[in-house]
Image: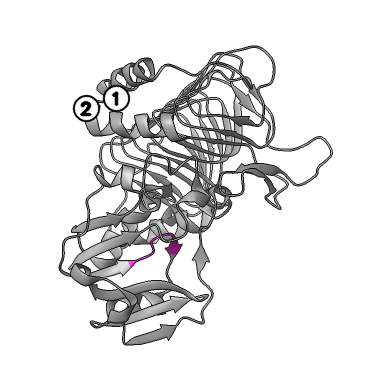
Amino acid sequence: MQLVFSDAQFWEDFLPLTFTRPVAEMRCGMLTFSERWQKLLDTSEISFITEDFLQEKFRKPEPVESLFIVPNFLPTENVLVQIKDLKAGEALVYENELLAAKVNMDRFSLNQIGKMTDIHEELLFFKQPTDLFSYNEKAIDFDFELLTKGRRSQELSETNGFLGNADDLFIEEGASVEFSTLNTRTGKIYIGKNAEVMEGCNLRGPIALCEESKFNLGAKIYGATTIGPHSKVGGEVNNIVIFGYSNKAHDGFLGNSVIGEWCNLGADTNSSNLKNNYATVKLWNYRSKRFADTGLQFAGLIMGDHSKTAINTQFNTGTVVGVAANIFKSGFPPNLIESFSWGGMKGDEKFKLEKACEVAEKAMARRKIPFTEVDRNILKYIYLEY
C-alpha cells in the first residue's frame, strides 16, 4: 500500500525548516515523521504531496489506491487502529481537517470520500517549529517504545556512572559510551547505532543520540534533546532538536532550539533562550510576515538548512535564520536573518548562489552524499523567490 504524505496547510507554518523538505521529513523524537509512519504502518512505499519546487526531489504519488495522511501528529492506539482499518472511500477528520483517507491517487478528490469519521480523542499535533522541541519528550517516549519493544540493549560499560531505571536506557549495536554519566530518572536515553558518547559527558534524559552521531568530550546534555544522524555536539545544550548532518561541536550554549541539516555552529556560538524581562518570546512567522507571540517563555534559535555561524556568534532570544545564511559579523545579529544572508546583519548583501551551492556540495561530500542538480534547483528557487 502506497503511503502518501500531505503537507496540507502546514508547510508554510514550519518555515524556514520546510524550505528544503516536506513536513513529513522533519525530525522529532528519534525519527522523522515519515520514518515513524513507515514503522507504524509497516510499509516502505512512500510518496509526498508538497510544494512544486520540492516535488522533483520528493517522489510524487503513483496513481494507485493509497493511504493519504497528514503526518505531523502522534496517534493514539485507537486512532492508529482506525487508520489501519480504513476502507476505500473512507476518511478520518480531526478538528474539521482531513487527517487520513483511503483513496485512489489517480483521481484524488474529496468526492471520492463517501464516509467521514470525526476523531474526538485529543491528538498531539505539531503545528509550528517550536512544537518540535516543546513536545520532544513525548515524541522520544513514543519512539523509544516503537524502536526498542522486544529488543535487548547493549550493556552499559562499567566505566560509566548511571542513575535511574535500566529499562529506560537503550544502546544500539556498535555504539560507544565510556567514562560518562547517564541519568534516566528524568527521561529515557537512546544511543543510536554506531553513535559515540565521548569521555566526560553528562547526559540527563530524555535524550536521543541518533545513528553515527557524537557527543564530544565533556558535553552537558539536558533533555528533551534529539541529535539526528551524523552530527557532532559539544558544550551545553538543553531541549533542542537537530535534524541531522549538522555540527555544534564546541563549547557554547544552545537551548529550546531547532537546527536543520548541513548547519555548522562555530566555536563559542551561544543562543539566549530567555528574555531578561521573562516575557514570552516572539518569533518571525513567514505566513503572516510578522513576529508572532509563541506563548513560550523559553525559545532560542530556529535555523534552516546549510546555515553557518562564525566563532563567538551571539544570538538573541527568539532568532530565526533562513537557508544558507553565513553569519560572521560582530555584535548581536537581528532576530530575523534572511536566507543567503552574507554576514547576518539587516541589509547585508546576499551570499552568491553559486558560492552557496559550492559550500553545500563540499559539506555534503564529507558525508559521501551527492549535491545534485535537483538540490541546486531547490536552493535557486529559495534564492530567487524568498
Residue found at the very far front of the displayed protein: 384
What range of the chain is rendered magenta?
A: 69-73
**Residue 135 % position (x, y):** 55, 55
Say which residue label 2 marks: 370
Describe the element under mark 2 as helix, strand or loop. loop
Q: Is residue 282 magenta?
A: no
Q: Is residue 267 visible?
A: yes
Say which residue label 1 marks: 364
Q: Residue at x 50, y 30 (%)?
A: 201
Label 2 or label 1, whichever comes before in sequence order: 1
Nearer to us in this view, 265 or 30: 265
Q: Is residue 70 magenta?
A: yes
Q: Name the side, left or right, on which 252 lies relative to 71.
A: right
Q: Name the side, left or right, on which 164 lies relative to 48.
A: right
Nearer to us in this view, 49 or 249: 49
Describe the element under mark 1 as helix, strand or loop. helix
